[in-house]
Amino acid sequence: MSSRETILKRLRERSDGPLTAPVSDFAVVTGRGWDAAERVARFERLIGSVHGEVVHTSRASWTDTLAEVLAAKGVMRLALGRQHPVAAEARSALADGGVELVDADRDIEEWQREQFESVDAGLTSTRGGIAETGSLWLWPTPDEPRLISLVPPIHIAVLDADSIEDTFFDVVECHAWAQGMPTNALLISGPSKTADIEQTLAYGVHGPKALVVIVRHTGGVPA
Amino acid sequence: MSAVQDAVHTYTPREFHRQAHDALGNPQIRDNFRRAMDGLMDKRRGVFSDWDLETLRELGANIRLRALAKLPDLLEQLEANCQANGIRVHWASDGDEACRIIGEICQSHDARAVIKGKSMVSEEMHLNAHLEQAGIEALESDLGEYLVQLNEQTPSHIIMPAIHLNTDEISEIMHTRTGTERTRDVDYMTAAARQQLRERFMAADVGVSGVNFAVAETGTLCLVENEGNGRMTTTVPPVHIAVTGIEKVVEQLRDVPPLYALLTRSATGQHVTTYFNMISGPRKPDEHDGPREVHLVLVDNGRSSIYQDDELLDTLRCIRCGACMNHCPVYTRVGGHTYGTTYPGPIGSILMPHMLGLEETKDLPTASSLCGACGEVCPVKIPIPDLLVRLRKESVGQGRGNVPGAGVKRSAKEVAAWKGFEWLATHPAAWRRTTALAGKLQKLLPSSIGPWTDYRSAPKPAKASLHALVKRHRRGEGES
Ligand code: SF4
């Protein structure tokens, strides 16, 4: 008998008899009832508490904000996609600036060392945010592959304020994740960190040292 | 540098008492653990304060129980959905078989270098040693694991592997092993490790990771981490092998958010970790990064035995948060290595006897004062103290005999003594005669009775029993 059969048989022929599966009540992880302003405020407070930086801007002028962030962080080379509107708008806005744009939609084998060693920041869109934990959720695509939010020392993420939801559970349910998962789905809540050296927090141990979230608003922009 | 020299020391659960004695005599170890555990307990308290913690724990326990109730079906469903997603699934009855499977996958790719994300199951089966024997280098990439590996040690905590080391000791280890400057600057050391490991990620042929939750419904592997080394391990090398115990499966995707909320808060007092990485397949043809091949190795290694018994089953609800060790007064004083097992602390004491047998681990269930702290903080409400008592019973042959090595501590003398006591206590006349005699022979009774009298004086029976005194009092004789 194969190990697979042996294991399954042992589990099925359980000596104390079959178990009854309880029904779960998920009320405790949903139904927060926060309004839009509260969601933004919570998101900012939570991600800020783990060293994530939040910059508010309007939907119309977000690329100006991006340019300011890049200048403030001294970013010379920015990796980004091409097709996603975030990437496309960033590309046209930055076309004749001083920042070199690095195509992220290439097989990693072609540019691994370049990505690891000479890209200053990665720009990505996000699918949404989570107010309760201050998290971003991303489903990397061929246009914006997995590693541009991980390998460069700075990750700049663009988030629409109205895509922030209350809880992780709400996101999984409302967007029917179970109907079809991508190769890789990610929650990102702050820059990479460790406390492995005597409980002292240090950032950027493997991933980005800094995470900047550009929050785009269609209505008023909070101060 | 006590802990640095400690590297050559190998620990075994058989020597628990001697190791505990040594650890208690080492102020550095006690200090390092005390400080770390105090901090972790405070953080956990803070992060749960605005939560309906009891309801959430109830839900967590309920989700884990539901998964276990359907375990064989869910494992098959997980396998089918993983395969549909392009993940290859392997089954291993024990650690050796799992090592063999992983070794063969590595060899089929001519792999020479494996990079590892944190995985306690791989520690449990001694994967690194196995790979090294096959000429394959296995390098840990979680910073704590990396430091512990540089120091030729094993983790002393399941979440924070290097918690037994302080900054000076780590600086010394990095200096001797990697040539960095001696420093107390944590940012400098972290940056140096980043640099050293980046090269290794790029050069690795295979990435090996653990799994926190495996979702049957969608064939998804979930990994929880702060550093990003897990994402690197599962994305950069061309082959990813995930290895996990068969109990890690959950039924649905919606089961994941509550367990994740409990895990991060219980483990490190965080609302959320930096990364939650959900993998549902290898790189698709149009994608530009990620491994070309993903394997899942499902390891039994004693779990299906634990599964047989209604009471012991609770052990399998564990989500490996480490809260029970953070709150354990014994763990905090003796540290993780003292236990001599992959999983230390309360969870180790209820899990390792099944993996190694009670012959090896008979002292672990007694490494507890049964204060109850572990059971109170456990996010999935495992009644750890009850399980410790059950294993104590098993070890003296008073249980159901469902644990390997049951009865190892059974001593004919002890059994006879209790039998005698039982008889006496149920025969009043004989009881009175014996206690009266014991009172008279006071001086002749032994003053040393085993370990009990190492730190205490032996009990002396009173000249007259309480019973006799009351009787006399009633007769109006007063005390004599
Ligand atoms: S037994 Fe409970 S407290 Fe201990 S590691 Fe497992 S889940 Fe956490």
Image (tube, rainbow, N blue to C red):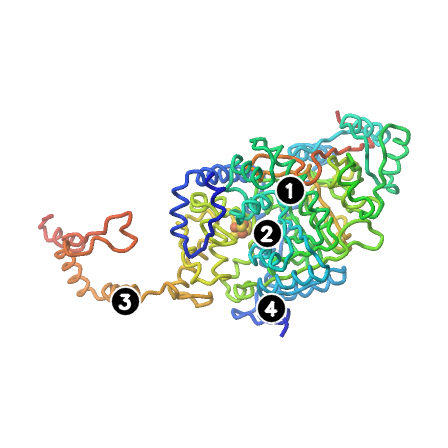
Q: Are marks 2 and 3 on the same chain?
A: yes
The amino acid pointed to by label 4 is Ile
Question: What is the spatial separation of the Cα atoms under label 2 and label 1, in whole angstroms?
Answer: 25 Å
Is disc 3 placed on a helix, strand or loop? helix
Q: Quadrant of residue B64?
A: bottom right
Crowding at mark 4 (Cα within 10 Å: few <14, some 14-19, many 20+): many
Residue B330: % across, % down: 42, 46
The amino acid pointed to by label 1 is Asn
Question: What is the spatial separation of the Cα atoms under label 2 and label 3, in whole angstroms?
Answer: 46 Å
Residue B200: % across, % down: 69, 46
Contact check, label 3 and label 4, Cβ < 8 Å: no
Query: On what subunit does the disc labeled 2 rest?
Result: B
Contact check, label 2 and label 3, Cβ < 8 Å: no
Contact check, label 4 and label 1, Cβ < 8 Å: no
Query: On what subunit does the disc labeled 4 rest?
Result: A
Q: Which label was assigned to residue B59?
A: 2
Q: Which label was assigned to residue A7?
A: 4
Question: What is the spatial separation of the Cα atoms under label 1 and label 3, in whole angstroms?
Answer: 56 Å
Crowding at mark 2 (Cα within 10 Å: few <14, some 14-19, many 20+): many
Furthest residue in direction bottom, as rendered = A1
The amino acid pointed to by label 2 is Leu
